[in-house]
């Protein structure tokens, strides 16, 4: 009896109907595609992180044009960065623009970085947050008021208004 079995189906094979064979291939192919996709996406995320690290290194080495080129290339893939990396991207992009004399760009990116830091304080270390605030201070003063004052800072009146003419509710002690 066992010999007859081995003659019909050699060891290591299992009889499978034609329709089942297609399903098995589809499942194997699907698994392979999923694994390949996951590995590719992990590699891509690392690539974006590496590109951000290169831009940061260029900025710190005072190679601002190179930093800006890296950051502009990375901008289309901004959504692939995690939230902390996005804050870092905005900070480096803004500081690079500041060093290149691109005041409007600098203010835009640094303001976005400040908003990101308010949501995720751990995104930038304390020293970098202080640099961010110092760099934005002249921009805020030129706008007439601190757009996003640091926590605990007293409110400032817009240009041309004294504190007593602002339209803010008065509080009594």
Image: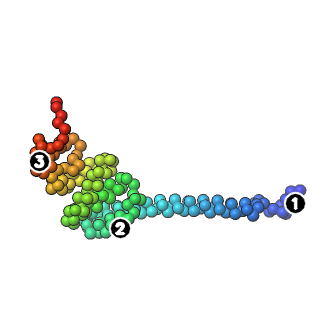
Q: Secondary structure at mark 1?
A: helix
Q: Nearer the viewer, mark 2 or mark 1?
A: 2
Q: Position of residue 20 (x, y in %)?
A: 72, 60
Query: As drawn, is 106 to the left or to the right of 87?
Result: left
Which type of secondary structure does the marked residue at label 3 adopt? loop
One can see residue 1 in this view: yes
Image quadrant where one finds the N terminus: bottom right
Give the percent coordinates (x, y) of residue 110: 25, 56
The percent position of residue 75, horizontal first and vertical second, equals 35, 64
Q: Secondary structure at mark 2?
A: helix
Q: Quadrant of the C terminus?
A: top left
Q: Counting residues from the N terminus, which is met first, the one under dot 3 or under dot 2? A: 2
Q: Residue furthest top?
A: 173
Q: Which residue is mark 1?
A: 4
Q: Sequence order check: which comes first, mark 2 or mark 1?
A: 1
Q: Residues within 10 Å of mark 2 (few under 14, many from 20)?
A: some
**Which residue is denoted by mark 2 in the rendering?**
73
Q: Calculate the distance from the C-alpha at mark 2 to the C-alpha at mark 1.
A: 66 Å
Residue at (28, 61) in percent of width and height? 93
> In the image as oriented, which residue stretches furthest toward the right?
1
Picture disc at residue 161: 3
């Amino acid at each position: 009896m066992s010999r007859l079995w081995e003659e019909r189906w050699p060891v290591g094979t299992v009889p499978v109907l034609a329709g089942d064979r297609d399903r098995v291939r589809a499942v194997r192919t699907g698994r392979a595609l999923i694994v390949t996709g996951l590995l590719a996406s992990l590699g891509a995320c690392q690539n974006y992180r590496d590109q951000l690290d290169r831009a940061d290194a260029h900025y710190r080495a005072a190679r601002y044009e190179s930093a800006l080129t890296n950051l502009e290339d990375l901008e289309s893939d901004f959504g692939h960065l995690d939230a902390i990396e996005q804050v870092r991207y905005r900070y480096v992009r803004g500081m690079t623009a500041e060093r290149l004399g691109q005041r409007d760009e600098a203010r835009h990116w640094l303001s976005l970085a400040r908003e990101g830091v308010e949501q995720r304080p751990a995104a930038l270390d304390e020293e970098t947050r202080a640099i961010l605030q110092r760099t934005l201070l002249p921009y805020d003063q030129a706008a007439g008021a601190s757009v996003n004052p640091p926590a605990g800072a007293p409110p400032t009146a817009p240009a041309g208004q004294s504190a007593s003419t602002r339209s803010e509710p008065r509080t009594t002690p």
